[in-house]
Image: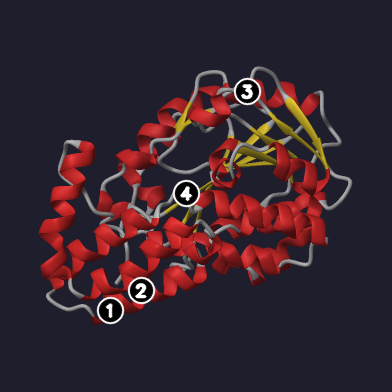
Amino acid sequence: MKLTIAIPTYNRNKILKNNLALLLPQLTADCKLVILDNSSDIPVEEDLKDILNDYQQFNIKVIRNRFNIGLTGNILRCFELCEDPWLWVLGDDDEVKSGAIEQIFFDIKNNIDIHFINYAWDEPSFLRKSNIHTRGMVDFIDKIETLGVALFISAGIYNANKISKYLSFGCFFQSTYAPHLVMLFLSVGDEGNCILSNKQIVVNKGFETPEALRWDQIFIYQITMLLRLPLSPNTIYNLKRKLEQLTRVWTINHLIFTLVKIGCVEKSTKRTSLLYDDIVRGFFYLDNRIISKIIMLLGFIIVRYPVFFNPILNYIYRLKRGKKFEPIRNLRI
């Protein structure tokens, strides 16, 4: 069984180097490592040549894009360039666990006909007591803890022969921020098999990445475009329920607090108000709880008068959480 490990990266050479120190000793002759440099300011191949030179006995390639083709564009390149039966798209800032590659080969050897393996990585998925097998998209969506668990790309292994057939759909729907899910959903359809594993191959270190190097969080709110995929009515219904669940994780309260803070700093509410309108109508409309609808409506007013509401919100946050509110700084306005 051959495996391609593809790492899309941009301007995170130091973080990538630390991760490679954990990954490279695990490589075998059945692995191919492809690093996709999205036109970083300092080319990856130049900056990391010392550590890569120590593993010349393995199949390692660094491919540099002529231009920055965006986060999702570079993820799609991982699928495009994969020539092996199996693909692991590994985030450059996610810490590889000891024995990860050995675990992957064990699983794909014993499950050659599956479409996808999702490994545990966060609190809900850590609660898996054993592997969970799913058949078809309705079953997959029902059994996965949250859509965010599937969205985390580093915890997934793809059957490239099955998934990459839908690369054109991934390209067309890359504005969802989840082109890998687009291809997965269409590939699995009504009959495809997946595994939700109780094992762990990575530790999510994205929250430790410096804010200036994180992806622009506004993209994540475009994930509701997944509902436009050509899937069965039952799949779309269940997918909508899972997206509604995300609105309770990525809360409207946090968005309002963040935009008020940014509005105070910017001393302008035009852009923050437009962004709030766009995100509410594009994502948070799925949350049908009465209290959420009331908060959304209040948010339209609060975001437009940040100087007035900022001290009130600060007081409420300290009262409830006992600490100062930290806004999302990687949110484009």
| Residue hosting label 1 | 271
Q: Position of residue 315 (x, y in %)?
A: 13, 49
Residues under labels 1 and 4: Cα distance? Answer: 25 Å
Earlier in the chain: of badge 3 and badge 1, it is 3
Q: Disc 1 residue type?
A: Arg
| Residue hosting label 2 | 275
Closest to the camera, between mark 4 and mark 3, is 4
Residue depicted at x 74% and y 27%:
132
Closest to the camera, between mark 1 and mark 4, is 4
| Residue hosting label 3 | 128
Identify the secondary structure beneath mark 2. helix
Image quarter hosting the C terminus:
bottom left
| Residue hosting label 4 | 248
- Residue 245: which numbered mark, if any? none
Q: According to the image, what is the colour scheme of the structure?
A: secondary structure
Q: Disc 3 residue type?
A: Arg
Earlier in the chain: of badge 2 and badge 3, it is 3
Report the side of 135 relative to 92 (left or right): right
